Image (tube, grey):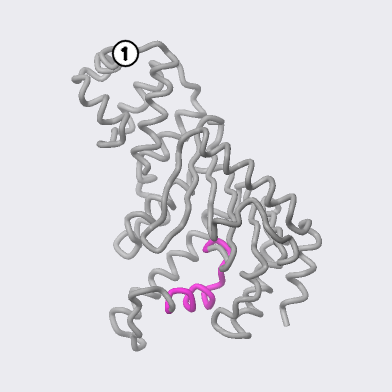
Amino acid sequence: MRRRLVGGALRRYREQAGYALEDAARVLECDRSKISRIETGQRGIRPKELRELLAEYGVPEGEQAALVAIASRGGPGGWWHPYADVLPGAYLDYVIMESAASEIMIYEAQVIPDLLQTDDYARAIAAAEPGHVTAEPGDAADEQREDAVAARALRRQAVLPGRRLWVVLGEGALRQAVGGPGVMAGQMSHLVRLIDDFPGLTIQVLPFSAGAHAAAASASLAILRFPDAPSLGVVHLEGLSGGVYLDSQEDVARYIRAFALLRAAALSAPDSARLLSGLRV
């Protein structure tokens, strides 16, 4: 998906600059088939080559930086590197794009989003996943699951600060007793603390009383937007097999409009915070 997102952007920039495939090939001193495969996401591109093309097309430095961050694996300092062997490839692709995003919009109908979960809640979700095998403490499966929980905790620490994060939670996510009453009480307290600790985080609850709404056909969606790159965005619709990505400008715009309608139908942020506070016991 990262290759497709970068390739599609390169194609748009090339066409806007009035370059043919042959012109781009001359910049990298390669054949036009390589440029074609890069633009269709069939192959990746090295950061140096990416910067050369973007500079040739006259792309501003801010947009260049966003695309380079998406195209690379974030360098050796990426928080996910110690856990690359326990994170599925599709999930790893998503978190690399997420780490490069400046604005994240999330809707969840039934569960608390990964970024807002406590460790106990995350363990309960992992234990219910298809294919899960009950593990004894200390065995390999248990260690792998704990590594995955630790990776998600690091993800929260890395992503929450410094970004604009809008979250709409369906009321069902607050009522589904994941892990039992104690886990849910801790999760509700955690949400209240996050609202207080991160000014860039807005949580709104979509109550059952809202009735039909703009995302009624979707149980989970996330929209990523990137710094200084208004034409760049991606929508992720989660599923059991890894989910579906949409990256056309028309699809991204459609989901942004739907998310705006969701926010309008949801409780206000202060009312949502009061509701969450009342669920802590």
Q: To which quarter of the image does residue 40 belong?
A: top left
Secondary structure, mark 1, is: loop
Give the residue drawn at x 35%, y 62%: 87
Residue 99 at x, y percent in the picture = 48, 48
The residue furthest bottom is: 136
Q: Is residue 220 left or right of residue 90?
A: right
Residue 56 at x, y percent in the picture = 38, 16
Give the residue drawn at x 80%, y 62%: 271
Query: Which quarter shows the N terminus?
Result: top left
Q: To which quarter of the image does residue 209 belong?
A: bottom right
Q: Would you place residue 250 above or below residue 212 in this image? A: above
Which of 60/12 is in front? 12
Q: Is 117 colored magenta in this rendering?
A: yes
Q: Would you place residue 189 above or below residue 87 in this image? A: below
Give the residue drawn at x 77%, y 75%: 278
Q: To which quarter of the image does residue 247 belong?
A: top left
Residue 53 at x, y percent in the picture = 35, 21
Residue 167 at x, y percent in the picture = 64, 56
In the image, what residue type sits under mark 1?
Ala
Query: Which quarter shows the C terminus?
Result: bottom right
What residue does disc 1 label?
20
Main secondary structure of the magenta stretch: helix
Q: Is residue 190 left or right of residue 99?
A: right
Q: How many marks?
A: 1
How crowded is the residue under tag 1: few (<14 C-alpha within 10 Å), some, or many (20+)?
few
Give the residue drawn at x 56%, y 79%: 178
Q: Would you place residue 161 above or below residue 102 in this image? A: below
User: In the rendered structure, which segment of residues is drawn in magenta?
Assistant: 114-127
Q: Would you place residue 38 above or below residue 182 in this image? A: above
Q: Is 229 colored magenta in this rendering?
A: no
